Amino acid sequence: MDLIEELRWRGMFHDMMPGTDEHLRQNAPISGYIGFDPTAPSLHIGNLATIMLLVHLQRAGHRPLALVGGATGMIGDPSGKSAERNLLDEEALRRNQAGIRAQLEKFLVFDDSPTGALVVNNYDWFKDFGFLGFLREVGKHLTVNYMMAKDSVKRRISGDENSGAEGLSYTEFSYQLLQGYDFVHLFRTYGCTLQMGASDQWGNITTGTELIRRMGTAEPEEGAQKPAKAYALTGQLITKADGTKYGKSETGTVWLDASLTSPYQFYQFFLNAADADVPRLIRVFTLLTQPEIEALEAEHAEAPHKRILQKALAEQVTTRVHGAEAYEAALAASQVLFGGGELASLDEATLLDVFAGVPRLEVPRAELAEMNVVSLLSEATGGTIFPSKGEARKMMQAGGVSLNREKVAPEHLATDVTPLLGQYLVAQKGKKNYFLLKLV
């Protein structure tokens, strides 16, 4: 597989240093790396595009290195930020790093082959690097003028009211120097000749290639091939058709960790992708081939309401991130809401997840005895579902009310309906209005 050609047709390619394409073709396998920020316990959708860069690098016959920034994570990258981030302690960073490694293992092949992936942590080489030693060995090679010319620095250093920036501390100003030295270390230690990242990382990446050029090539560790030159490649930032950043839902960031974003919410996020966005998303976030994607697009064009592209995208990504079993559970949960699936098939966590956005009401269990469903859905719920018994009775007589997917009539008793998991009733008013009742 030709890496650059693959990235281009997928819409993932943004820029590269001259000679990068030839270097990849003539020196396989080369080692290339991407850095990941460990300031959160999980990676998120925004990281997926850069993870996929490493996936395609490995599929093209090269060795991917994932650098977890234990040291640089203590400082924070100013790129794309208007304010300095909070600093984490070493223990929190280590926990986050462990979670990130586990997520990367779902995408990359870790083995002892020449293309086997490797996770490295820059805290390991920065922890004993003294301040004076760093200034003497690294800092002297770059001028302040060079560092200030980077867009990420210029935007923050102005600190004017219109930019929304808060200025830039020396701590964050030094970030590009630290990231640049990461490349120097990996270049020397592992023969790593390529750094990749999103397009907003171009300044930091080229700082690394410039440091390598100025610092010279020290001898690599035993067993590593001595590199000759370093290269840079960036991928496109993933944005929506309207130009806004992709990766957040109405409730916030979409994480890869199931405890932060459930598989059902994750699946729904991709299932709800706009028609204008999904052709690009399915190229970036899946490994479906060009003929497979074009076939899906043709099928989708014939019946857009079936959301064929969205379903394929959601299946592929949810299965990769959370596994086939979690995907099947998310699909079943979706069918409960939109396809008439069985409510009784859901466990409590999934049930609450499916109905996370609907009104929740508590009803004393003791009051249900001899109460009919008319009273339950009006008086007992404080008028939230129906403001009066008359309105509830009228809609029930028209067949417009269900409890746990069973149509109910005014003469039904509340105890005629078996609660889900012994404590939940799902009330449906009309086609789209849901309410979750919990018996307490």
Image (cartoon, grey):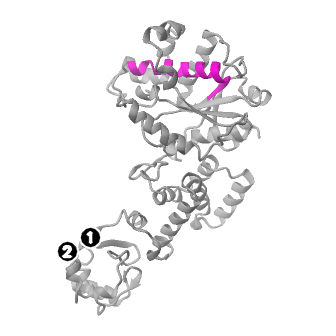
Q: Position of residue 290 (x, y in %)?
A: 72, 51
Q: Which mark is residue 295?
A: none
Which residue is under mark 2? 382
Q: Position of residue 153 (x, y in %)?
A: 44, 21
State which quadrant residue 85 falls in.
top left
Residue nearest the observer in this picture, 124 or 296: 124
Residue 172 drawn in magenta: yes
- Span of residues in magenta: 171-195
Query: Which quadrant, please, contains the C terminus?
Result: bottom left
Please give left or right for residue 198 compared with residue 86 in the image. right
Residue 426 drawn in magenta: no
Residue type highlighted by circle 2: Gly
Q: Main secondary structure of the magenta part?
A: helix
Identified at 52% across, 47% down, the residue is 240
Reply above or below: 267 against 173: below
Q: Position of residue 243 (x, y in %)?
A: 50, 43
